[in-house]
Image: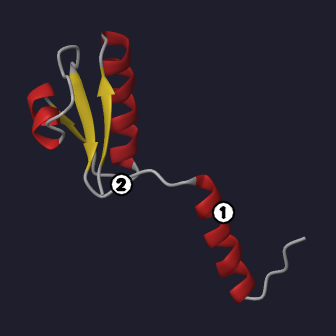
Amino acid sequence: DLFIELACDDHRLQYYRRVASFNRLCGVNVTEITADQVKDKFPLIDTEDVLAGFYVEDDGRVNPYDACMALAKGSKLNGAKIF
């Protein structure tokens, strides 16, 4: 899986640069990539207004319900009681 956030205006570009810098301090391998590099990873996307992408190769999104159920199951298997 991978994760890319797109900056399509200068405000978002500066915001994502700050977030990426903080995430790197936390050990997350965030890479700023060009619009052409975004297009290489997702050929169907229109990158006309994309200034940059912020790419994390080993990250993604999760369905919150499924994540909650998995955490609950693991907790129950380890003796927790959920009320």
Residue matched to label 1: 68
Mark 2 and mark 1: Cα distance apart in space: 18 Å
User: Residue 15, image x and y in percent?
Assistant: 39, 22
> Quick one: quadrant of the N terminus?
bottom left
Q: Nearer the viewer, residue 54 or 38?
A: 38
* Above/below status of 29 relative to 39: below
Q: Determine which quarter of the picture holds residue 77.
A: bottom right
* Above/below status of 82 relative to 40: below
Q: Residue at x 21, y 30 (%)?
A: 45
> Quick one: quadrant of the C terminus?
bottom right
* Above/below status of 29 relative to 81: above
**Residue 33 numbered tag:** none
Number of the front mark, 2 or 1 = 1
**Residue 59 numbered tag:** 2
Q: How many neighbours does mark 1 have within 10 angstroms: few (below 14), some (14-19), or many (20 or more)?
A: few
Q: How many numbered discs?
A: 2
N-term-proximal mark, 2 vs 1: 2
What amino acid is at disc 1? Answer: Cys
Which color scheme is applied? secondary structure
Badge 1 marks a residue whose secondary structure is helix
Badge 2 marks a residue whose secondary structure is loop
Q: Which residue is drawn at 13% across and 33% down?
A: 39
Left or right, 23 with reference to 32: right
Left or right, 83 with reference to 35: right
Residue furthest to the front: 44
User: Residue 41, image x and y in percent?
Assistant: 15, 43
What amino acid is at disc 2? Answer: Asp
User: Residue 12, image x and y in percent?
Assistant: 37, 18
Q: Determine which quarter of the picture holds residue 52.
A: top left
